[in-house]
């Protein structure tokens, strides 16, 4: 079943675009060029941040951090190994991608931790960045209850990501 | 600025815990290894990311966005009452939410900003209204149909079925968006 998801998406998007009389091929080329731009903007973060994260893992610092935070994480049912990601996710999107990719490589992309990391990355956002950009551009100074509400949503996201992966994959 | 401090703290913490655990050699090797793995990750990511962005661009023009916004109309009307009488705001809102759902974060931001500005209106208020808070909370909760970048990372790490996390992602983003909106509603009653 899952073998057909990707081919079906590829065929469907091309056929639908052609049906609308759109030049699907050159649309894909433009899109792919945008993907390359995104990658280019992401690469510096990946290099700089993975340097720091790899040093931290080699020093045993990540293990110590996970150990230190594990009572709180266990209380919410979140794997303590994901501590680095949970801490950096609301602050920087590309840093979170770097940390998440390192965690997936470290624990195995199809392990429970690897999958939890992927779901966390896929279903949360860079909360503080988003709030700053949206309100900053519109000149809003008093954000009232936005930050607490958004952080509650993030926490629920991290808890649900762990629970959903445990439920569906173990 | 914040990330500069985080980076410095991570490095100091690594060196200190390296000294205590006797891993100092590994820590200094880790610096160059990490930089190397950053480039390797970027290269592995290039193919899936370009392909996916290309497919998304085709899907958008294929009318998926228009269909989605028709589906979302009733929900947006309830969450953002002033969009019922303001078609410009309604368009910005549905374009913002649709771009989020399709995983086009870069396209979502300008439409979201336009919506917040429109909500501020000609008075240029500096205090966030309930509708603005709801929109930003909805954006920070990230409702995504297909998390393309994550799928690209997974397949670059050798995952055979990178999209098998989809049901888990949907459950998670729907519940976090729902709880975020509930929290916003509750806090909106208490906050002045």
Image (tube, rainbow, N blue to C red):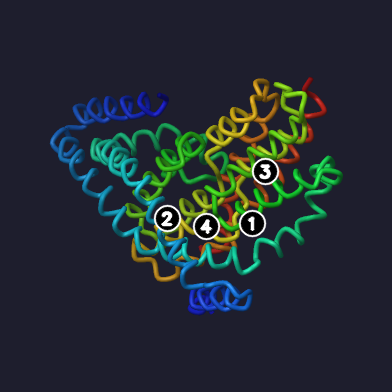
Read off the residue under disc 2: A114
Mark 2 is surrounded, within 10 Å at the Cα level, by few (under 14), some (14 to 19) or many (20 or more) other residues, namely: many
Question: Of residues A76 and A151, which is closer to you in this image?
Answer: A151
Tell which tag, 2 or 4, sits nearer the viewer.
4
What is the quadrant of residue A158 in the picture? top right
Q: Where does residue A129 sit, x and y in percent of width and height?
A: 53, 34
What is the quadrant of residue A1 in the picture? bottom right
Instruction: Check residue B138 in the rendering and tell me which mark sits there, or answer none.
Output: 3
Q: Pinpoint the chain carrying mark 1.
A: B
Distance from disc 2 to disc 4, alpha carbons, whole Å, reads: 15 Å
Q: At 73% from the left edge and 36% from the top edge, which residue is drawn? A: B118
Question: Of residues A119 and A62, which is closer to you in this image?
Answer: A119
Read off the residue under disc 1: B171
Q: Pinpoint the chain carrying mark 3.
A: B
Mark 3 is surrounded, within 10 Å at the Cα level, by few (under 14), some (14 to 19) or many (20 or more) other residues, namely: many
Disc 3 with disc 1 on a shared chain:
yes
Q: At 64% from the left edge and 56% from the top edge, which residue is drawn? A: B171
Q: At 42% from the left edge and 62% from the top edge, which residue is drawn? A: A32
Question: Of residues B63 and A68, which is closer to you in this image?
Answer: B63
Q: At 40% from the left edge and 61% from the top edge, which residue is drawn? A: B50
Taking the image as shown, residue A94 lies to the left or right of residue B69, namely left
Mark 1 is surrounded, within 10 Å at the Cα level, by few (under 14), some (14 to 19) or many (20 or more) other residues, namely: some
Q: Where does residue A155 sit, x and y in percent of width and height?
A: 59, 39
Distance from disc 1 to disc 4, alpha carbons, whole Å, reads: 13 Å
Read off the residue under disc 4: B147
Disc 1 with disc 4 on a shared chain:
yes
- Marks 2 and 4: CB-CB under 8 Å? no
Distance from disc 2 to disc 3, alpha carbons, whole Å, reads: 26 Å
């Amino acid at each position: 079943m899952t073998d057909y998801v990707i081919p079906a998406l590829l065929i469907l998007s091309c056929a639908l675009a052609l049906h609308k009389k759109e030049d699907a091929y050159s649309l894909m080329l433009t899109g792919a060029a945008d993907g390359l731009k995104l990658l280019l903007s992401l690469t510096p973060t990946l290099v700089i941040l993975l340097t720091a994260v790899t040093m931290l893992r080699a020093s045993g610092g990540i293990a110590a951090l996970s150990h230190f935070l594990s009572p709180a994480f266990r209380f919410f049912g979140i794997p303590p190994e994901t501590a680095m990601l949970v801490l950096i996710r609301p602050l920087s999107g590309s840093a979170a991608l770097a940390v998440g990719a390192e965690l997936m490589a470290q624990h195995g992309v199809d392990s429970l931790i690897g999958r939890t990391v992927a779901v966390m990355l896929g279903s949360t956002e860079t909360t503080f960045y988003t709030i700053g950009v949206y309100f900053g551009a519109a000149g809003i100074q008093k954000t009232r209850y936005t930050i607490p509400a958004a952080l509650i949503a993030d926490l629920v996201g991290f808890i649900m990501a762990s629970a959903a992966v445990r439920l569906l994959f173990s | 600025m914040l990330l500069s401090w985080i980076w410095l703290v991570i490095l100091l913490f690594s060196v200190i815990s390296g000294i205590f655990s006797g891993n100092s050699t590994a820590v200094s090797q880790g610096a160059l290894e990490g930089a190397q793995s950053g480039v390797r990750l970027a290269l592995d990511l290039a193919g899936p990311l370009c392909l996916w962005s290309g497919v998304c661009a085709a899907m958008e023009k294929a009318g998926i966005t228009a269909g989605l916004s028709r589906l979302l109309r009733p929900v947006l009307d309830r969450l953002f009452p002033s969009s019922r009488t303001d078609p410009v705001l309604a368009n910005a809102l549905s374009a913002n939410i649709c771009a989020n759902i399709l995983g086009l974060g870069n396209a979502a931001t300008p439409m979201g900003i336009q919506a917040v500005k429109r909500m501020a209106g000609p008075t240029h208020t500096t205090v966030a209204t309930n509708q603005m808070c709801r929109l930003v909370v909805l954006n920070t909760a990230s409702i995504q149909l297909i998390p393309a970048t994550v799928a690209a990372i997974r397949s670059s790490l050798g995952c055979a079925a990178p999209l098998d996390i989809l049901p888990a992602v949907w459950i998670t983003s729907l519940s976090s968006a729902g709880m975020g909106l509930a929290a916003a509603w509750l806090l909106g009653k208490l906050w002045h």
